[in-house]
Amino acid sequence: MSTAYSKADIAALQEAARRHLWLHFTRMSSYSTADVPVIVRGEGQYVFDQNGKRYLDGLAGLFVSQIGHGRSEVAEAGARQASELAYFPLWSYAHPQAIQLAERLAALAPGDLNRVFFTSSGSEAVESAWKLAKQYFKAVGQPSRYKVLSRSIAYHGTSMGALAITGLPGIKEPFEPLPPGGVRVPNTNFYRAPEFVADDVTAFGVWAADEIERAILREGEDSVAAVFLEPCQNSGGCFPPPPGYFQRVRDICDRYGVLLVSDEVICAFGRLGHYFGSERYGYQPDIITFAKGVTSGYAPLGGMLVTDRLMAPFNEGQNTFLHGVTFAGHPVSCAVAMANLDVFEKEDLLGNVRANEAAFRATLGKLTDLPIVGDVRGDGYFYGIELVKDKETRQTFDDDESERLLRGFLSGALFDAGLICRADDRGDPVIQLSPPLTCTQEHFDEMEQILRSVLTAAWTRV
Ligand SMILES: Cc1ncc(COP(=O)(O)O)c(C=O)c1O
Protein backbone atom coordinates (compact mmCIF):
# COMPACT_ATOMS: atom_id res chain seq x y z
CA MET A 1 0.00 0.00 0.00
CA SER A 2 1.38 3.40 -0.92
CA THR A 3 1.66 5.83 1.94
CA ALA A 4 3.10 8.82 0.12
CA TYR A 5 0.88 11.88 0.13
CA SER A 6 1.08 14.46 -2.63
CA LYS A 7 3.04 17.67 -1.96
CA ALA A 8 -0.24 19.60 -1.85
CA ASP A 9 -1.79 17.14 0.68
CA ILE A 10 1.28 17.41 2.89
CA ALA A 11 1.26 21.20 2.79
CA ALA A 12 -2.46 21.27 3.63
CA LEU A 13 -1.97 18.89 6.57
CA GLN A 14 0.92 20.95 7.91
CA GLU A 15 -1.03 24.17 7.62
CA ALA A 16 -4.09 22.71 9.35
CA ALA A 17 -1.98 21.07 12.08
CA ARG A 18 -0.20 24.35 12.84
CA ARG A 19 -3.41 26.29 12.90
CA HIS A 20 -5.81 23.91 14.68
CA LEU A 21 -4.24 20.90 16.38
CA TRP A 22 -2.93 20.97 19.95
CA LEU A 23 -0.46 18.17 20.66
CA HIS A 24 -0.19 16.72 24.17
CA PHE A 25 2.80 17.49 26.38
CA THR A 26 4.30 19.32 23.38
CA ARG A 27 6.00 22.68 23.03
CA MET A 28 3.85 23.86 20.17
CA SER A 29 6.20 26.74 19.42
CA SER A 30 8.79 24.24 18.19
CA TYR A 31 6.46 23.57 15.22
CA SER A 32 6.00 27.17 14.23
CA THR A 33 8.81 26.70 11.73
CA ALA A 34 9.52 22.94 11.72
CA ASP A 35 7.11 20.36 10.27
CA VAL A 36 4.76 18.49 12.59
CA PRO A 37 5.68 14.79 12.28
CA VAL A 38 2.67 13.07 10.70
CA ILE A 39 2.33 9.29 10.85
CA VAL A 40 -0.13 7.94 8.34
CA ARG A 41 0.09 4.14 8.38
CA GLY A 42 1.42 1.18 10.34
CA GLU A 43 2.45 -2.33 9.39
CA GLY A 44 3.83 -4.85 11.85
CA GLN A 45 6.67 -3.30 13.83
CA TYR A 46 6.89 -0.24 11.54
CA VAL A 47 5.00 2.98 10.92
CA PHE A 48 5.20 5.29 7.89
CA ASP A 49 5.04 9.05 7.63
CA GLN A 50 3.32 11.21 5.02
CA ASN A 51 6.34 10.94 2.72
CA GLY A 52 6.33 7.15 2.86
CA LYS A 53 9.41 7.08 5.12
CA ARG A 54 9.54 4.03 7.42
CA TYR A 55 10.24 4.08 11.17
CA LEU A 56 10.80 1.19 13.57
CA ASP A 57 8.20 1.68 16.29
CA GLY A 58 10.48 1.16 19.26
CA LEU A 59 7.89 2.53 21.68
CA ALA A 60 4.79 0.69 20.42
CA GLY A 61 3.28 4.13 19.83
CA LEU A 62 3.15 5.01 23.51
CA PHE A 63 3.61 1.58 25.17
CA VAL A 64 0.43 0.48 23.39
CA SER A 65 0.81 -1.50 20.15
CA GLN A 66 1.63 -4.92 21.60
CA ILE A 67 0.56 -6.95 18.56
CA GLY A 68 1.98 -4.42 16.09
CA HIS A 69 0.24 -2.37 13.43
CA GLY A 70 -2.10 -3.15 10.57
CA ARG A 71 -3.85 -6.26 11.91
CA SER A 72 -6.97 -6.44 9.82
CA GLU A 73 -8.61 -9.18 11.93
CA VAL A 74 -8.61 -6.87 14.96
CA ALA A 75 -9.82 -3.89 12.93
CA GLU A 76 -12.59 -6.04 11.44
CA ALA A 77 -13.73 -7.21 14.88
CA GLY A 78 -14.23 -3.53 15.75
CA ALA A 79 -16.06 -2.81 12.50
CA ARG A 80 -18.40 -5.80 12.99
CA GLN A 81 -19.20 -4.66 16.51
CA ALA A 82 -19.87 -1.08 15.40
CA SER A 83 -22.43 -2.41 12.88
CA GLU A 84 -24.13 -4.63 15.44
CA LEU A 85 -24.16 -2.33 18.50
CA ALA A 86 -21.90 0.69 18.27
CA TYR A 87 -22.62 2.01 21.70
CA PHE A 88 -24.45 1.34 24.87
CA PRO A 89 -23.39 2.45 28.35
CA LEU A 90 -22.39 0.28 31.28
CA TRP A 91 -24.57 2.42 33.53
CA SER A 92 -27.24 -0.03 34.76
CA TYR A 93 -27.05 -2.01 31.49
CA ALA A 94 -24.51 -4.47 30.17
CA HIS A 95 -23.62 -5.71 26.70
CA PRO A 96 -22.15 -9.09 25.76
CA GLN A 97 -18.75 -7.67 24.79
CA ALA A 98 -18.11 -6.15 28.23
CA ILE A 99 -19.39 -9.27 29.99
CA GLN A 100 -17.24 -11.63 27.94
CA LEU A 101 -14.13 -9.46 28.21
CA ALA A 102 -14.60 -9.08 31.98
CA GLU A 103 -14.86 -12.86 32.31
CA ARG A 104 -11.75 -13.38 30.18
CA LEU A 105 -9.68 -10.80 32.06
CA ALA A 106 -10.76 -12.23 35.42
CA ALA A 107 -9.62 -15.68 34.26
CA LEU A 108 -6.23 -14.29 33.19
CA ALA A 109 -5.68 -12.17 36.31
CA PRO A 110 -3.85 -13.54 39.34
CA GLY A 111 -5.66 -14.68 42.52
CA ASP A 112 -9.13 -13.41 43.33
CA LEU A 113 -9.02 -10.35 41.07
CA ASN A 114 -12.39 -11.27 39.67
CA ARG A 115 -14.28 -8.05 39.08
CA VAL A 116 -13.64 -5.64 36.23
CA PHE A 117 -14.61 -1.98 36.28
CA PHE A 118 -13.97 -0.58 32.80
CA THR A 119 -12.80 2.94 31.96
CA SER A 120 -11.67 4.49 28.70
CA SER A 121 -8.09 5.34 29.66
CA GLY A 122 -5.27 4.72 32.10
CA SER A 123 -5.75 7.97 33.99
CA GLU A 124 -9.40 7.10 34.49
CA ALA A 125 -8.37 3.65 35.71
CA VAL A 126 -6.02 5.18 38.30
CA GLU A 127 -8.61 7.77 39.27
CA SER A 128 -11.20 5.00 39.67
CA ALA A 129 -8.87 2.93 41.84
CA TRP A 130 -8.32 5.82 44.25
CA LYS A 131 -12.04 6.59 44.36
CA LEU A 132 -12.84 2.93 44.98
CA ALA A 133 -10.28 2.77 47.80
CA LYS A 134 -11.82 5.84 49.45
CA GLN A 135 -15.41 4.68 49.12
CA TYR A 136 -14.53 1.10 50.13
CA PHE A 137 -12.94 2.27 53.38
CA LYS A 138 -15.95 4.45 54.15
CA ALA A 139 -18.21 1.45 53.50
CA VAL A 140 -16.27 -0.78 55.90
CA GLY A 141 -16.13 1.78 58.72
CA GLN A 142 -12.64 3.22 58.18
CA PRO A 143 -13.53 6.65 56.80
CA SER A 144 -10.23 8.27 57.80
CA ARG A 145 -8.30 6.34 55.15
CA TYR A 146 -7.85 8.49 52.04
CA LYS A 147 -4.12 9.01 51.44
CA VAL A 148 -2.14 7.31 48.68
CA LEU A 149 1.54 6.53 48.55
CA SER A 150 3.41 6.41 45.25
CA ARG A 151 7.02 6.62 44.16
CA SER A 152 9.08 9.60 43.20
CA ILE A 153 9.23 10.33 39.45
CA ALA A 154 6.46 7.75 38.78
CA TYR A 155 3.81 8.68 36.22
CA HIS A 156 0.25 7.59 36.98
CA GLY A 157 -1.73 9.88 34.68
CA THR A 158 -2.91 13.44 34.29
CA SER A 159 -6.47 13.86 35.58
CA MET A 160 -6.47 15.71 38.91
CA GLY A 161 -6.64 12.62 41.13
CA ALA A 162 -4.18 10.62 39.04
CA LEU A 163 -1.90 13.67 38.93
CA ALA A 164 -1.93 13.83 42.73
CA ILE A 165 -0.57 10.25 42.64
CA THR A 166 1.96 11.04 39.90
CA GLY A 167 5.41 11.75 41.34
CA LEU A 168 6.73 14.26 38.80
CA PRO A 169 6.78 17.72 40.40
CA GLY A 170 7.25 19.52 37.06
CA ILE A 171 3.93 18.39 35.58
CA LYS A 172 2.01 18.86 38.84
CA GLU A 173 3.10 22.36 39.77
CA PRO A 174 0.85 24.32 37.32
CA PHE A 175 -2.21 22.53 38.72
CA GLU A 176 -1.62 22.89 42.43
CA PRO A 177 -3.45 22.67 44.71
CA LEU A 178 -4.20 19.07 43.75
CA PRO A 179 -6.53 16.78 45.74
CA PRO A 180 -4.91 16.23 49.14
CA GLY A 181 -3.41 12.93 50.18
CA GLY A 182 -0.66 12.15 47.65
CA VAL A 183 2.51 11.09 49.49
CA ARG A 184 5.87 10.22 47.88
CA VAL A 185 8.18 7.33 48.71
CA PRO A 186 11.53 6.43 47.03
CA ASN A 187 11.60 4.59 43.73
CA THR A 188 13.76 1.57 42.96
CA ASN A 189 16.44 3.06 40.71
CA PHE A 190 19.35 0.92 41.91
CA TYR A 191 21.75 2.85 39.67
CA ARG A 192 21.06 5.85 41.90
CA ALA A 193 20.72 3.96 45.19
CA PRO A 194 21.80 5.71 48.41
CA GLU A 195 25.41 4.93 49.22
CA PHE A 196 24.72 2.72 52.25
CA VAL A 197 22.85 0.18 50.05
CA ALA A 198 24.54 0.87 46.71
CA ASP A 199 26.45 -2.45 46.67
CA ASP A 200 23.58 -4.73 47.58
CA VAL A 201 20.41 -4.75 45.51
CA THR A 202 18.51 -6.87 48.04
CA ALA A 203 19.37 -4.51 50.89
CA PHE A 204 18.36 -1.62 48.63
CA GLY A 205 14.98 -3.31 48.11
CA VAL A 206 14.51 -3.81 51.85
CA TRP A 207 15.30 -0.14 52.44
CA ALA A 208 12.95 1.06 49.66
CA ALA A 209 10.09 -1.16 50.89
CA ASP A 210 10.66 -0.10 54.50
CA GLU A 211 10.41 3.52 53.39
CA ILE A 212 6.79 2.68 52.55
CA GLU A 213 6.25 1.45 56.09
CA ARG A 214 7.93 4.54 57.52
CA ALA A 215 5.69 6.76 55.36
CA ILE A 216 2.56 4.92 56.54
CA LEU A 217 3.60 5.42 60.17
CA ARG A 218 4.57 9.05 59.60
CA GLU A 219 1.27 9.87 57.87
CA GLY A 220 -0.76 7.94 60.43
CA GLU A 221 -1.59 4.32 59.69
CA ASP A 222 -5.34 4.95 59.85
CA SER A 223 -5.11 7.64 57.18
CA VAL A 224 -3.50 5.63 54.37
CA ALA A 225 -5.82 3.93 51.86
CA ALA A 226 -3.49 2.58 49.18
CA VAL A 227 -0.01 2.27 47.74
CA PHE A 228 0.19 2.71 43.95
CA LEU A 229 3.17 1.01 42.31
CA GLU A 230 4.01 -0.01 38.78
CA PRO A 231 5.54 -3.50 38.52
CA CYS A 232 8.50 -1.93 36.65
CA GLN A 233 8.45 1.86 36.96
CA ASN A 234 8.47 3.54 33.58
CA SER A 235 9.21 7.17 34.29
CA GLY A 236 12.85 7.70 35.18
CA GLY A 237 13.84 4.93 32.78
CA CYS A 238 12.59 1.45 33.74
CA PHE A 239 13.21 0.63 37.38
CA PRO A 240 12.60 -3.10 37.93
CA PRO A 241 11.88 -4.08 41.53
CA PRO A 242 14.81 -5.40 43.57
CA PRO A 243 14.46 -9.06 44.60
CA GLY A 244 11.97 -9.42 47.46
CA TYR A 245 10.75 -5.82 47.22
CA PHE A 246 7.14 -6.55 46.33
CA GLN A 247 6.88 -9.42 48.81
CA ARG A 248 7.97 -7.04 51.56
CA VAL A 249 5.61 -4.31 50.35
CA ARG A 250 2.75 -6.83 50.34
CA ASP A 251 3.54 -7.74 53.97
CA ILE A 252 3.66 -4.06 54.95
CA CYS A 253 0.31 -3.36 53.25
CA ASP A 254 -1.25 -6.35 55.02
CA ARG A 255 0.18 -5.27 58.38
CA TYR A 256 -1.41 -1.81 58.15
CA GLY A 257 -4.57 -2.70 56.20
CA VAL A 258 -3.44 -0.66 53.17
CA LEU A 259 -4.46 -1.67 49.62
CA LEU A 260 -1.74 -2.55 47.13
CA VAL A 261 -2.62 -1.14 43.70
CA SER A 262 -0.50 -2.43 40.83
CA ASP A 263 -0.63 0.21 38.11
CA GLU A 264 -0.12 -1.96 35.05
CA VAL A 265 -1.18 0.54 32.41
CA ILE A 266 2.16 -0.22 30.75
CA CYS A 267 3.28 -3.49 32.35
CA ALA A 268 0.23 -5.68 31.61
CA PHE A 269 -0.56 -7.56 28.41
CA GLY A 270 2.81 -9.04 27.66
CA ARG A 271 5.13 -6.09 28.18
CA LEU A 272 7.00 -8.17 30.79
CA GLY A 273 6.25 -11.58 29.24
CA HIS A 274 3.10 -12.22 31.29
CA TYR A 275 -0.46 -11.04 31.04
CA PHE A 276 0.13 -9.03 34.22
CA GLY A 277 3.36 -7.55 35.53
CA SER A 278 2.51 -8.62 39.08
CA GLU A 279 2.72 -12.26 37.92
CA ARG A 280 6.20 -11.64 36.60
CA TYR A 281 7.40 -10.45 39.99
CA GLY A 282 5.25 -12.85 42.03
CA TYR A 283 3.00 -10.59 44.11
CA GLN A 284 -0.73 -10.38 44.58
CA PRO A 285 -2.27 -6.90 44.26
CA ASP A 286 -5.69 -5.84 45.58
CA ILE A 287 -6.32 -3.82 42.44
CA ILE A 288 -4.70 -3.88 38.99
CA THR A 289 -5.18 -0.85 36.75
CA PHE A 290 -4.76 -1.45 33.02
CA ALA A 291 -5.26 0.29 29.62
CA LYS A 292 -3.00 0.60 26.54
CA GLY A 293 -2.06 -2.99 25.58
CA VAL A 294 -5.49 -4.44 26.38
CA THR A 295 -6.54 -3.38 22.87
CA SER A 296 -3.07 -2.78 21.40
CA GLY A 297 -4.50 0.64 20.54
CA TYR A 298 -7.02 -0.54 17.95
CA ALA A 299 -9.59 1.24 20.16
CA PRO A 300 -9.29 3.01 23.53
CA LEU A 301 -10.01 1.08 26.72
CA GLY A 302 -8.87 0.94 30.33
CA GLY A 303 -10.09 -0.48 33.57
CA MET A 304 -9.36 -1.93 36.95
CA LEU A 305 -9.48 -5.49 38.18
CA VAL A 306 -10.44 -5.74 41.85
CA THR A 307 -10.68 -8.51 44.39
CA ASP A 308 -13.92 -10.09 45.55
CA ARG A 309 -13.18 -8.60 48.99
CA LEU A 310 -13.20 -5.02 47.67
CA MET A 311 -16.39 -5.67 45.73
CA ALA A 312 -18.19 -7.26 48.68
CA PRO A 313 -19.60 -4.09 50.31
CA PHE A 314 -20.95 -2.95 46.94
CA ASN A 315 -22.85 -6.19 46.51
CA GLU A 316 -25.02 -5.40 49.53
CA GLY A 317 -28.23 -3.44 50.03
CA GLN A 318 -28.32 0.05 48.55
CA ASN A 319 -24.55 0.43 48.25
CA THR A 320 -23.33 1.71 44.90
CA PHE A 321 -19.88 2.68 43.66
CA LEU A 322 -20.72 6.28 42.74
CA HIS A 323 -18.52 6.57 39.73
CA GLY A 324 -18.72 6.10 35.95
CA VAL A 325 -17.78 7.47 32.54
CA THR A 326 -19.73 7.40 29.29
CA PHE A 327 -17.32 5.49 27.07
CA ALA A 328 -16.04 2.99 29.65
CA GLY A 329 -16.18 -0.54 28.32
CA HIS A 330 -17.25 0.70 24.89
CA PRO A 331 -18.61 -2.27 22.88
CA VAL A 332 -16.22 -1.65 19.98
CA SER A 333 -13.24 -1.44 22.34
CA CYS A 334 -14.26 -4.64 24.14
CA ALA A 335 -14.70 -6.52 20.85
CA VAL A 336 -11.29 -5.25 19.75
CA ALA A 337 -9.74 -6.33 23.08
CA MET A 338 -11.11 -9.85 22.60
CA ALA A 339 -9.62 -10.01 19.09
CA ASN A 340 -6.34 -8.60 20.43
CA LEU A 341 -6.17 -11.32 23.09
CA ASP A 342 -6.92 -13.92 20.40
CA VAL A 343 -3.77 -12.75 18.59
CA PHE A 344 -1.80 -13.06 21.85
CA GLU A 345 -2.93 -16.68 22.13
CA LYS A 346 -2.61 -17.67 18.48
CA GLU A 347 0.89 -16.26 18.15
CA ASP A 348 2.07 -17.01 21.68
CA LEU A 349 3.27 -13.44 22.13
CA LEU A 350 4.06 -14.00 25.80
CA GLY A 351 6.26 -16.91 24.73
CA ASN A 352 7.96 -14.67 22.16
CA VAL A 353 8.80 -12.07 24.81
CA ARG A 354 10.09 -14.68 27.24
CA ALA A 355 12.14 -16.43 24.56
CA ASN A 356 13.71 -13.22 23.23
CA GLU A 357 14.03 -10.88 26.18
CA ALA A 358 17.53 -12.07 27.05
CA ALA A 359 18.63 -11.41 23.47
CA PHE A 360 17.00 -7.96 23.52
CA ARG A 361 18.75 -7.14 26.77
CA ALA A 362 22.09 -8.41 25.47
CA THR A 363 21.76 -6.44 22.22
CA LEU A 364 21.00 -3.19 24.02
CA GLY A 365 23.68 -4.07 26.57
CA LYS A 366 26.30 -3.70 23.81
CA LEU A 367 25.67 0.04 23.99
CA THR A 368 27.33 0.21 27.39
CA ASP A 369 30.68 0.49 25.56
CA LEU A 370 29.67 4.04 24.63
CA PRO A 371 30.89 6.75 27.01
CA ILE A 372 27.43 8.34 27.24
CA VAL A 373 25.60 5.15 28.27
CA GLY A 374 25.59 4.76 32.05
CA ASP A 375 23.03 2.01 32.53
CA VAL A 376 20.76 -0.29 30.53
CA ARG A 377 17.92 -1.71 32.61
CA GLY A 378 14.48 -3.21 32.39
CA ASP A 379 12.72 -6.51 31.83
CA GLY A 380 10.69 -8.17 29.11
CA TYR A 381 10.31 -5.83 26.14
CA PHE A 382 10.72 -2.75 28.29
CA TYR A 383 14.10 -1.01 28.66
CA GLY A 384 15.56 2.27 29.76
CA ILE A 385 19.02 3.53 28.80
CA GLU A 386 20.37 6.13 31.21
CA LEU A 387 22.68 8.73 29.71
CA VAL A 388 25.51 10.19 31.74
CA LYS A 389 28.17 12.83 31.39
CA ASP A 390 30.73 10.76 33.25
CA LYS A 391 30.45 7.01 33.51
CA GLU A 392 32.95 6.66 36.35
CA THR A 393 31.20 9.09 38.68
CA ARG A 394 27.71 8.57 37.18
CA GLN A 395 27.46 12.33 36.89
CA THR A 396 24.28 13.30 35.10
CA PHE A 397 23.61 16.27 32.83
CA ASP A 398 22.43 19.56 34.29
CA ASP A 399 19.15 21.08 33.09
CA ASP A 400 20.71 23.15 30.30
CA GLU A 401 22.84 20.28 29.01
CA SER A 402 19.88 17.97 29.15
CA GLU A 403 17.75 20.47 27.26
CA ARG A 404 20.38 20.82 24.54
CA LEU A 405 21.08 17.10 24.35
CA LEU A 406 17.57 15.67 24.47
CA ARG A 407 15.35 18.31 22.91
CA GLY A 408 18.04 20.02 20.90
CA PHE A 409 19.50 16.89 19.38
CA LEU A 410 18.55 13.34 20.43
CA SER A 411 14.78 13.32 19.94
CA GLY A 412 15.02 14.72 16.43
CA ALA A 413 18.11 12.73 15.44
CA LEU A 414 16.60 9.39 16.51
CA PHE A 415 13.40 10.15 14.62
CA ASP A 416 15.36 11.23 11.53
CA ALA A 417 17.36 8.01 11.76
CA GLY A 418 14.12 6.00 11.61
CA LEU A 419 13.60 4.98 15.24
CA ILE A 420 10.60 5.92 17.34
CA CYS A 421 11.61 5.83 20.99
CA ARG A 422 11.48 8.30 23.82
CA ALA A 423 14.21 10.60 25.06
CA ASP A 424 12.96 11.64 28.48
CA ASP A 425 14.47 13.88 31.15
CA ARG A 426 11.67 14.02 33.68
CA GLY A 427 14.11 12.17 35.92
CA ASP A 428 17.75 11.76 34.88
CA PRO A 429 18.02 11.68 31.05
CA VAL A 430 17.04 8.31 29.58
CA ILE A 431 15.99 6.71 26.33
CA GLN A 432 12.97 4.42 26.64
CA LEU A 433 12.28 1.38 24.47
CA SER A 434 9.08 -0.62 24.51
CA PRO A 435 8.54 -2.16 21.07
CA PRO A 436 5.73 -4.40 19.80
CA LEU A 437 5.87 -7.88 21.32
CA THR A 438 6.34 -9.38 17.87
CA CYS A 439 9.87 -7.99 17.58
CA THR A 440 12.78 -10.38 17.08
CA GLN A 441 16.56 -10.14 16.76
CA GLU A 442 16.51 -8.20 13.47
CA HIS A 443 14.53 -5.44 15.19
CA PHE A 444 16.78 -5.46 18.26
CA ASP A 445 19.79 -5.08 15.94
CA GLU A 446 18.15 -2.21 14.08
CA MET A 447 17.43 -0.41 17.35
CA GLU A 448 20.98 -0.97 18.57
CA GLN A 449 22.55 0.26 15.34
CA ILE A 450 20.48 3.44 15.18
CA LEU A 451 21.05 4.16 18.87
CA ARG A 452 24.78 3.52 18.50
CA SER A 453 25.20 5.99 15.66
CA VAL A 454 22.98 8.69 17.18
CA LEU A 455 24.45 8.37 20.70
CA THR A 456 27.97 8.46 19.24
CA ALA A 457 27.08 11.72 17.49
CA ALA A 458 25.48 13.02 20.69
CA TRP A 459 28.70 12.45 22.64
CA THR A 460 30.62 14.76 20.30
CA ARG A 461 28.22 17.53 21.36
CA VAL A 462 28.58 17.00 25.12
C1 LIG B 1 1.67 3.69 34.71
C2 LIG B 1 0.68 4.59 34.04
N1 LIG B 1 -0.46 4.89 34.66
C3 LIG B 1 -1.38 5.69 34.10
C4 LIG B 1 -1.17 6.25 32.85
C5 LIG B 1 -2.20 7.14 32.24
O1 LIG B 1 -2.80 6.52 31.14
P1 LIG B 1 -3.57 7.38 30.03
O2 LIG B 1 -2.56 8.16 29.28
O3 LIG B 1 -4.26 6.32 29.19
O4 LIG B 1 -4.56 8.23 30.75
C6 LIG B 1 0.02 5.96 32.16
C7 LIG B 1 0.26 6.52 30.82
O5 LIG B 1 1.29 6.38 30.24
C8 LIG B 1 0.97 5.12 32.78
O6 LIG B 1 2.12 4.84 32.17
Image (spheres, helix red, strand yellow):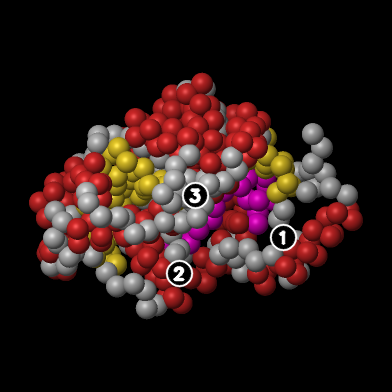
Of 48 and 341, the residue lying toward us: 341
Residue 428, magenta (yes or no): yes
Provide residue 446's location: percent of width, then percent of height.
61, 36
Residue 399, magenta (yes or no): no
Mark 3 or mark 1, which is nearer to you? Answer: 3
- Distance CA(mark 3)–CA(mark 2): 32 Å
Nearest to N terminus: mark 3 or mark 2: 3
- The residue positioned 13% from the left and 60% from the top of the image is 141
The quadrant in which the C terminus is found is bottom right
355 left or right, relative to 196? right
Vertical arrangement, residue 26 with respect to residue 332, above or below: below
> Do we see residue 155 in this rendering?
no
Could you tell me the amino acid type at mark 2?
Answer: Ile
Could you tell me the amino acid type at mark 1?
Answer: Val
Of 75 and 27, the residue lying toward us: 75
Q: Which mark is residue 171?
A: 2
Could you tell me the amino acid type at mark 3?
Answer: Pro
Vertical arrangement, residue 222 with respect to residue 203, above or below: below
Q: Is disc 3 surrounded by few (<14), some (14 to 19) or many (20+) residues within 10 Å?
A: some
Magenta residue span: 412-431
Q: Residue furthest left?
A: 255
- The residue positioned 12% from the left and 64% from the top of the image is 222
330 left or right, relative to 229? right
- Distance CA(mark 2)–CA(mark 1): 23 Å
Label 3 secondary element: loop
Provide residue 133's location: percent of width, then percent of height.
26, 57
> What residue does disc 1 label?
36
Q: Which mark is residue 89?
A: 3
Labels 2 & 1 near each other (Cβ < 8 A): no
